Image (tube, grey):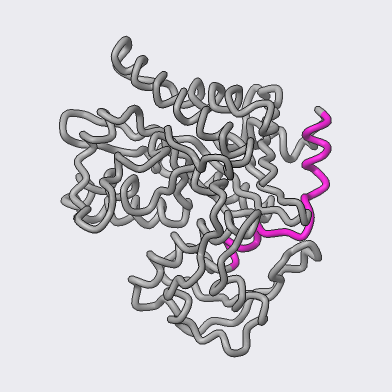
Amino acid sequence: MRNEGSAASPVHLALCRATAQVELEMGQLLADEGRWDEEYITQRLCMLIRPEVTAVRFNRPQERQVGADYIWWWVDRSGESFGCLIQAKNIKRRGRRSSIDFQYGDGRQMQALFQTADLLRVPAGYMLYAGDRDYQAQLGCMADHSSRLPCYEREGAAVTLVPALLAERVALMSSVVPVYAQASAAEVFCQWAKPLIDFTASKPYGYGNPLHRIFDLTDADPGLREFLSAGQVGARKVARHIFDTVLRMASMQFSAVRSAPPLIDPDAASVFPNLPGWRAHFRASYFEHTLRGLRHTLPTYVEQCLAGDPPPEIADRVAGIIVVRV
């Protein structure tokens, strides 16, 4: 796997190393057993990113309230951090059809994921495991790649992250449009999921993105306007990656900027406590749901978790915590 060269941070190189290894192992398991296990790949990923990235697995309670795997926190030198509650999902393939079981348990698992993300005041997301390059090439992507690399040739495509707001919309459309259901998994992988290693690459991200111009942000916090228009690094870069993905889907919806009252986050650590309430067709304001994960400081429970003493409200709901220092 290529990397950023001499400018790459040890953390980025660790994520590249781990992604390449789990891609290899998924390919081997597919050849030997016809499948790979989500939990096993998650455990391997957590082991392989150490010691550059901190990953702590909690003791498994007999009945965890939600199937979410890990809370990820990216924290930079300024102390700003961005958190996301992430659940692992395999991209499965049968013949020429692929699928992602977002609606596992008749949708109850997804509902629990969103409820826990609301409780923790972070966005929800899915980590997609896509096998090796040969497996990815056969997922059935119908997109036009004339102006960019095919989705399966992206660096780090074996482990990607997709916001749960998008996953829920795709799952809903798949349930009402059978023809769309046949192509939805490949579309999620190609169009909406971003390689995990993109978040720690050395170059700033987000400068010049024109999508924010669809909003009238005249009365918005000047800091929010700058965040949406300027290139970002550190924790803000991760937040922009995820927000821009959600924004791209929202911009395709007629109600993207339908009038709605602003939302106030009472958490003093929130970087943007006052955000537009626009929802488009999502379950919640995509501004608030995504950007509530951006904090001036890490929540106090993070240090407790790293010290081996996670609060019950954390340990009962998730498998562990990962802290990435960007």
Of residue 230 and residue 127, the one placed in the foreground of this image is 230
- Screen quadrant of the N terminus: top left
Taking the magenta stretch, the answer to whether it contains residue 290 is yes
| Position of residue 14 measured from the top left corner of the image (x, y, whole percent) | 58, 31
Q: Residue furthest front?
A: 6
Determine whether, in the image, residue 140 is placed left or right of residue 243: left
Determine whether, in the image, residue 60 is placed left or right of residue 281: right
Of residue 60 and residue 23, the one placed in the foreground of this image is 23
| Position of residue 80 measured from the top left corner of the image (x, y, whole percent) | 74, 56
Taking the magenta stretch, the answer to whether it contains residue 83 is no
Asked if one can make out residue 195 in the rendered structure from this viewpoint, the answer is yes
Of residue 134 and residue 315, the one placed in the foreground of this image is 134
The answer to whether residue 245 is above or below residue 201 is below
The structure residue drawn at horizontal position 70% and vertical position 28%, both measured from the top left corner, is: 56
The structure residue drawn at horizontal position 68% and vertical position 52%, both measured from the top left corner, is: 119
Determine whether, in the image, residue 283 is placed left or right of residue 265: left
The structure residue drawn at horizontal position 43% and vertical position 44%, both measured from the top left corner, is: 107
Of residue 44 and residue 69, the one placed in the foreground of this image is 44
| Position of residue 248 measured from the top left corner of the image (x, y, whole percent) | 40, 66
The answer to whether residue 209 is above or below residue 90 is below
For the record, the magenta segment spans: 288-307
The structure residue drawn at horizontal position 36% and vertical position 33%, both measured from the top left corner, is: 130
The answer to whether residue 62 is above or below residue 77 is above
The answer to whether residue 182 is above or below residue 122 is above
Asked if one can make out residue 109 in the rendered structure from this viewpoint, the answer is no
Q: Residue furthest bottom?
A: 218
